Image (cartoon, helix red, strand yellow):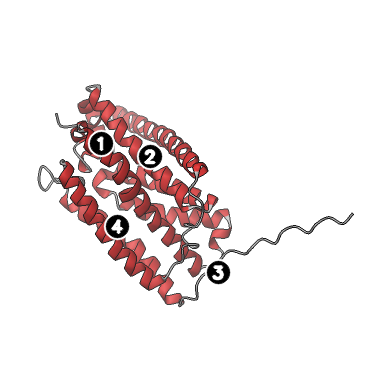
């Protein structure tokens, strides 16, 4: 009995023919954006009492979301015109079914635990250094992420505001926008150095480059914020490339941000805001 031949698998869509200089300029432009935004945000930090990234009112938050959407569309149009990345190169043709949602949720939990362990270890080490130097532990205040530069945690008491930041802000303004940026960086690097994303070493290097730039974009949150967001970005890059899926990374990012806001609200409800992050009553 002659067995049937295995089905022929279709090859992935080839990258569109784009001049090398276009891809290089696209990557450079993408890598410049986050540090530039981070420096602008850092310069505004503390300039006024309400100089935070997310306004304290629902109407103000919606305006910021709309402004971010417009700016993103303008920048995306510029990047698309310059580098012309395809949806396949951005890993956007993968399915966004229940498996992607389950993976995103699972990875967000893993990131939460991993970053918690890293932060605890770093704070403990810093505390020991301060102890042996004879300094007060109050010096650790500047060692935590400056979350209050992103928003006033007390505004999360408004259920509508909390709903918006755990959905629109977490999954669209942050998750979708920032992961599309990361995917475009990877697409440009793959064009620049063909085959760089085919090995774990190449994926790790590409993820590390994007993570450093991503972390610098969070300068308003302080050095610890840069370190933590950079580490998170490194993990998001690896799972995007490992699963060849934009959506798994978007969902992991969104769930991580959403649970961060929920945890802030829980801390506030427990009356521990001042002790934990120096919240404003």
Say whether marks 2 and 1 touch (CB < 8 Å): no
Give the percent coordinates (x, y) of residue 103: 50, 41
Residue 102 seen by the camera: yes
Upstream in sequence: badge 3 or badge 4: 3
Please name the residue that numbered disc 2 is placed on: 256
Which labelled disc corresponds to residue 14? 3
Question: Dot 4: within a 10 Å radius of its alpha carbon, few (fewer than 14), some, or many (20 or more) residues?
Answer: some
| Mark 1 or mark 4, whichever is nearer to me | 1
Q: Residue at x 29, y 36 (%)?
A: 261
Instruction: Indicate which disc, 2 or 4, sits on the residue closer to the N terminus.
Output: 4
Callout 3 touching callout 1 (CB < 8 Å): no
How far apart marks 2 and 4 lie (CA) works out to: 22 Å
Q: Which residue is mark 1?
A: 162
Residue 75 position, x and y percent, is 30, 64
Comparing 175 with 131, the one in front is 175
Q: Where does residue 79 sit, x and y in percent of width and height?
A: 36, 67
């Amino acid at each position: 009995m002659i067995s049937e031949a295995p089905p022929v698998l279709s090859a992935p869509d080839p990258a569109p023919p784009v001049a090398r200089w276009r891809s290089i300029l696209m990557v450079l432009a993408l890598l410049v954006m986050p540090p530039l935004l981070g420096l602008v945000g850092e310069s505004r930090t503390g300039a006024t009492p309400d100089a935070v990234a997310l306004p304290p009112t629902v109407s103000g938050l919606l305006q910021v979301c709309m402004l971010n959407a417009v700016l993103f569309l303008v920048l995306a149009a510029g990047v698309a015109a310059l580098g012309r990345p395809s949806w396949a190169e951005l890993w956007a043709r993968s399915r966004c079914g229940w498996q992607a949602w389950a993976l995103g949720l699972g990875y967000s939990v893993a990131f939460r635990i991993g970053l918690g362990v890293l932060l605890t270890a770093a704070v403990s080490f810093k505390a020991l250094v301060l102890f042996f130097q004879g300094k007060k532990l109050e010096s650790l205040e500047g060692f935590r992420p400056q979350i209050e530069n992103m928003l006033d945690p007390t505004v999360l008491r408004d259920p509508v505001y909390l709903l918006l930041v755990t959905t629109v802000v977490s999954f669209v303004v942050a998750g979708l926008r920032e992961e599309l940026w990361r995917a475009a960086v990877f697409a440009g690097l793959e064009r620049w150095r063909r085959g760089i994303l085919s090995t774990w070493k190449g994926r790790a290097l590409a993820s590390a480059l994007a993570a450093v730039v991503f972390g610098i974009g969070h300068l308003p949150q302080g050095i610890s914020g840069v370190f933590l967001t950079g580490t998170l970005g490194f993990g998001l890059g690896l799972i995007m490339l490992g699963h060849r899926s934009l959506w798994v990374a978007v969902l992991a990012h969104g769930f991580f941000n959403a649970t961060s806001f929920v945890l802030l609200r829980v801390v506030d409800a427990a009356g521990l805001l001042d002790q934990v992050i120096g919240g404003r009553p």
